[in-house]
Image (tube, rainbow, N blue to C red):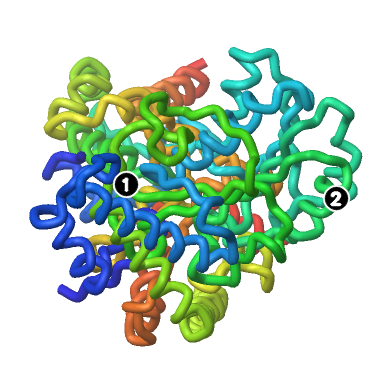
């Protein structure tokens, strides 16, 4: 049911964890529905210097989070938001089961929220 | 790698003795039991012998057993068949909220297409139906009540006799789904005072595609498979003779082995339940703590999701089941866990282990080693568990 890439990311999640002094945090989902993801980012020179995540959810949700973190690391904020979409994440994972496309594929949104959270903080500091 | 299979409620291997009993009926004794010549009548006799064996397992009469293709079909025949054949008794059906989908959806079918009114009876936190609540739900229009004997999700065994007796006193038909209990605890239709009772074969070591319905003598049923007069007109279609022979053999074995098997399975279950609760914090043992299936241990684990846990376990060769939303095709959490009042978030962490006689103490110890590791690993990156533990520290 799951691709080999999905199973690999599930068995060996990349960048799982918390950044205590994160520059931005993004949280999506709801544990009552089965999936919840929190993304933590460190930003340097407008680039994602570090990305970590915490995920409550199924195999797909964990693999998606891991893949998003891997795709995001080192990218500029703008590029990350452009390139990392639910669709591109699913593709890079070698596909996801149809019924997992919506509720488990939340990683791109969580990352975007973390970036927005960072940018809002920046704007506040500038003002 | 070691394999520890603990999902026997989902599927179980066909027992060797059962398979051997079946084999002659594929090529040598292939006749149609409805045929009038000797090749047919011999098979008809064999079929009736199997009916006798199944009847004996549940203390019924031979002419009170109809063979079906599954427990699900037997449940359909019981609920829809009995309701539609007894319309003059009323149009109200009561089912417990924790029935198998084949009972729940059969009842919903009656509601949607046949103008029935259905009451879904709530259960307490252990999964028990309260007799007083059932009594209050009965109305002059009630014609059928269906409450499962034992739950394959939480293990709880209902006080069927008490529930059935109060229905009988009011002339209401009572059906129980005994798929989970047959072969694990005594199932006696006289003792239980039920009018209809569902069995399936795989739970007894017979092949998939086997089941049976007990119906009290002369009870009328509308067939759910219309056809010829097979099964005395209660189910059309040529009987699946090899499978039925398998079911008969399995029923015989189940009857002989019941006391030892129940004792053996309970010990494994208690070993696992105690070990898990000792080694893993934040675990709820679901269902009734004592009045439960010998071969079933069910838990809800805080802070993690069941499908992910199943995959972590299967990577170690351990096979179990879950009622989590993510693992279901419909992406819905098991209604059984909801009916117990388990919060939706906790229900996501459901895991169910079902044993059979081929499991051993060594299997349980293997699970007790790997289960805490799998839970710990998933919790190590769970935001839900992080919040839960942060709160616990703060308190």
Secondary structure under badge 2?
helix
B128 shown above or below A67: below
The Cα–Cα distance between marks 1 and 2, rounded to whole angstroms, is: 34 Å
Query: For residue A73, which quarter of the picture?
Result: top left
Disc number for residue B143: none
In the figure, B264 relative to B303: above or below?
Answer: below
For the residue pair B60 and B336, the one nearer the viewer reads as B60
Q: Chain of mark 2?
A: B
Q: In x, y percent, where is residue B158?
A: 70, 59
What percent of the width, then of the height, locates residue A112? 36, 23
Residue, disc 1: B209
Is B100 positioned to the left or the right of B243 in the image? right
Q: Residue at x 54, y 43 (%)?
A: B100
Picture quadrant where residue A105 is located = top left
Q: Are marks 1 and 2 in contact (CB under 8 Å)?
A: no
Say whether disc 1 or disc 2 marks the residue closer to the N-terminus: 2
Q: Are marks 1 and 2 on the same chain?
A: yes
**Residue B16, horizontal then vertical, whole percent:** 22, 72
Q: Which mark is residue B166?
A: 2
> Residue B60 at what x, y percent from top left?
58, 60
Classed neighbour count for the residue bearing mark 1: other residues with Cα under 10 Å, few (<14), some (14–19), many (≥20): some
Indicate the secondary structure of the residue bearing disc 1.
loop
């Amino acid at each position: 049911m799951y691709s080999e890439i999905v199973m690999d990311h599930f068995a060996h999640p990349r960048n799982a964890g918390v950044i205590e002094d994160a520059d931005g945090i993004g949280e999506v989902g709801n544990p009552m529905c089965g999936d919840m993801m929190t993304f933590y980012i460190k930003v340097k020179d407008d680039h994602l210097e570090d990305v970590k995540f915490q995920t409550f959810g199924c195999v797909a949700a964990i693999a998606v989070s891991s893949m998003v973190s891997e795709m995001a690391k080192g990218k500029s904020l703008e590029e990350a938001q452009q390139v990392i979409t639910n669709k591109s994440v699913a593709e890079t994972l070698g596909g996801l089961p149809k019924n997992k496309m919506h509720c488990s594929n939340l990683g791109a949104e969580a990352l975007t929220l973390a970036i927005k959270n960072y940018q809002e903080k920046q704007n506040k500091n500038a003002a | 790698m070691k394999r520890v299979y603990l999902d026997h409620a989902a599927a179980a291997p066909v027992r060797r003795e059962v398979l051997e009993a079946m084999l002659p009926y594929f090529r040598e004794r292939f006749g149609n039991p409805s045929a009038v010549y000797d090749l047919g009548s011999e098979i008809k006799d064999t079929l009736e012998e199997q009916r006798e064996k199944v009847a004996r397992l549940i203390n019924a009469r031979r002419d009170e057993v109809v063979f079906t293709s599954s427990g699900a079909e037997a449940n359909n025949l019981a609920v829809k068949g009995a309701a539609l054949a007894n319309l003059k008794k009323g149009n109200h059906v009561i089912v417990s909220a924790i029935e198998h989908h084949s009972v729940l959806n059969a009842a919903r079918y009656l509601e949607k297409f046949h103008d029935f009114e259905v009451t879904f009876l709530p259960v307490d936190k252990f999964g028990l139906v309260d007799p007083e609540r059932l009594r209050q739900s009965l109305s002059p229009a009630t014609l059928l009540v269906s409450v499962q004997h034992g739950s394959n999700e939480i293990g709880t065994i209902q006080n069927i006799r008490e529930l059935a007796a109060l229905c009988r006193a009011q002339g209401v038909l009572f059906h129980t789904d005994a798929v989970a209990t047959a072969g694990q605890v005594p199932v006696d239709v006289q003792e239980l005072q039920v009018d209809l009772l569902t069995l399936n074969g795989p739970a007894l070591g017979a092949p998939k595609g086997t089941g049976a319905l007990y119906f009290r003598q002369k009870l009328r049923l509308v067939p759910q498979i219309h056809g010829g007069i097979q099964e005395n007109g209660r189910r059309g279609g040529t009987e699946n003779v090899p499978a039925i022979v398998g079911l008969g053999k399995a029923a015989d074995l189940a009857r002989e082995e019941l006391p030892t098997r129940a004792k053996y399975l309970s010990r494994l279950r208690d070993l696992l339940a105690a070990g898990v609760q000792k080694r893993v914090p934040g675990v709820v043992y679901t269902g009734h703590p004592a009045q439960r299936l010998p071969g079933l241990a069910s838990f809800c684990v805080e802070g993690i999701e069941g499908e992910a846990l199943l995959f972590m376990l299967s990577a170690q060769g351990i096979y179990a089941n879950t009622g989590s939303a993510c693992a279901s095709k419909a992406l819905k959490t098991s209604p059984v866990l909801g009916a117990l009042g388990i919060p939706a978030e906790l229900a996501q962490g459901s895991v169910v282990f079902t044993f059979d006689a081929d499991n051993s103490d060594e299997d349980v110890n293997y699970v007790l080693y790997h289960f805490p590791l799998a839970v710990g690993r998933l919790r190590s990156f769970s935001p839900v568990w992080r919040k839960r533990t942060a709160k616990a520290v703060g308190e």
